Structures are given as C-alpha cells and as structure tokens.
Amino acid sequence: MIDRIRSLFAKIFPRVGVPAAAGQFFLWDGIAPGSENQHGNEKINFMGKYRLVSNIHRPSITAFIPAKEKATGVAIIIAPGGGHKDIWIEHEGYAPAQWFCEHGIACFVLKYRLSKDVSSIYSVSEHALKDIQRAIRFVRSKSDSWGIEKNKIGVMGFSAGGELAGLAAINFDDGKENASDDIDKQSCYPDFQALIYPSDTRNFPVSKKSPPLFLLAGSLDSEIANDISKLYAKYQQAGSPAVLHIYENVDHGFGVQKSNKGKLADWPMQFYEWLSASGFIQ
C-alpha cells in the first residue's frame, strides 16, 4: 500500500521527494460546514516553477509520517501562503514537510478555504480558521496511530498561512465535550507556533496561555519584519516564550527550496533546535 502511495505522490508532486508514508485526509466527511452549495474540483496553476492550488471547498491535510525509528512524537500542521487567493503548495508546504519528516517530525500540509479566491464566499476568520482548528483536532484524534504525542502538536505557517497559524494560536478551546463528532471533542490548542514571514500580525494579542513562538522573516521584507519585531516585544512584555530571527538581505517567500543557500538553507534546523531547546524533542 505504501509503495502505491509513493508512486502516486511521485506522479503528482515530481518536484519534491516522497516521504516515508503519505496520504490525503479530508477534514470533514462530506461537505465542510460553510461550503454548502459550493462545488468544483481543486485547480492547479503554475507561476514559473511554483505549483499553486485554488478552488478549495473540501479542506484537507496531506500527511508526512516519519519512519518509526526516527519519530520524535512531534507533529506540525503546515499552512502554506498565497495571499488567501491560492496556496503555494510546494516550497511552503510539501518541501518543509519533507524536511521535517526526514528529521522525525510528522507533518500535515493543510489545504484551507481561500477568502480571496475568485467568487469566494469564505472568510479567514470564519472558514480558514475553522479549517486549521479542525486540522489540529484531527491530528490529535489520530495521534496514537501516527505515533504522535498529544501535547506536541503545533502549527507552522508561511505568509498568509502564517497569519492563519497565528490566529489558531489565539483562538482555541479544549474541545467540545458533548459533540456528536469525536474529532470535535479534541482540543484545538497548538502546543507551539512557527510564523514564517507572516502577514497581518500587528493586532495579535498575547497572554500567558500563548503557545511558544518562533518568528522568522527577512530584513528586505521590511513591513513584515517590523510587525513581527513588535509581536516579539509583546511576548517579551507578557513573559511568554518567543524567539525572533531577522535575516539580513533576505526578502519574502523563501520557504524551503534547493535554491536557498547558507542561512536560508539552515532555517529548518534552527527551528528544529528551538523545538529541542523548548523540550518538545528529547
């Protein structure tokens, strides 16, 4: 079965490697709440070498599960960016998932509903936020079968996906005890958050309950670098754990790709080491 999945992924995603195990899971059986009467298959477009996904009505996660002997028990829900118009699925989704999977971290690349897609009826605060919350609950509900520890499930987002990951870190609950859906009984609290050149963070509140935060942007991405520096200061004032990295002479949208060199190529390891220093990886 795994060989068949690998073969399928190699055909669909030829630009990135295939993880030890992979599969796509829809977050809701049937129609997602708020997507009634919305139809059509996902659309794939290209901008140069980049693959863009849009027209998403059935939000899903694609799982990258590490080999058992490498597994750390940590999981990340990854939200790629794309300005809420589309999803840059490879260098901000599958490629970082592949890297972290090879280093023992289970990853789940999120396809969420897009508020700025053509003729979209969706909003970030209503539909996209519900998608990432549901993804956290979904992974927590399957944690035993995937070798994941329930208190080591975090979020990572790039650009617009960083905004979404940050929203998940300030909008959470402990689960709905009387829910008819077992997945909804799970907490949607992210145990940590990594916001990589995130958009629209200037109004994010911070509290003692805020998950530990890893922030990263380039100095040439000046507006975002300034905003996350202010967010970092809020965490410092609140006494909540956070680290900030601003890379000189680096602009927006680097993600994880072979063209990254030096410090850009090393940022996933910096994050991995931060997870270790924070006690998530033993």
Image (cartoon, helix red, strand yellow):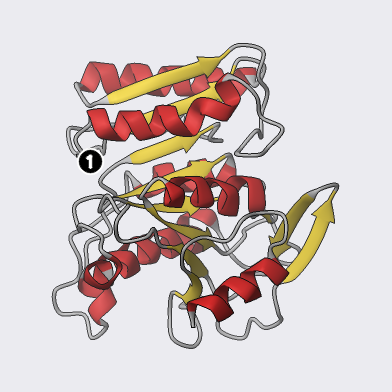
Q: Position of residue 201 (x, y in %)?
A: 47, 33
Label 1 is placed on what type of residue?
Phe
User: Quick one: 191 or 14, which is closer to the camera?
Assistant: 14
> Which quadrant of the figure contains the C terminus?
top left
**Label 1: element kind:** loop
User: Quick one: 107 or 117, which is closer to the camera?
Assistant: 107
Q: Which residue in the rendered view is the most extreme toward the top?
A: 248
Query: Is 115 placed left or right of 235 in the picture?
Result: right
Q: Which residue in the rendered view is the most extreme toward the right?
A: 48
User: Quick one: 234 or 98, which is closer to the camera?
Assistant: 98
- For the point 37% across and 60% down, which residue is it? 67
- Residue 131 appears anywhere in the view: yes
Question: Which residue is identified by label 1?
Answer: 280
Query: Is 116 placed left or right of 196 in the picture?
Result: right
- For the point 51% across and 66% down, which residue is it? 62
- For the point 69% across and 56% down, which residue is it? 86
Q: Where is residue 147 in the image (x, y as percent from the top left)?
A: 25, 63
- For the point 27% across and 17% down, which residue is it? 236
Q: Where is residue 3 in the image (x, y as percent from the top left)?
A: 54, 77
Query: Is 139 placed left or right of 31 in the picture?
Result: left
Tell me which corner region of the image, top left, top right, bottom left or bottom right, holds residue 94: bottom right
Q: Residues within 10 Å of mark 1 (few under 14, many from 20)?
A: many
Query: Is 11 placed left or right of 216 in the picture?
Result: right
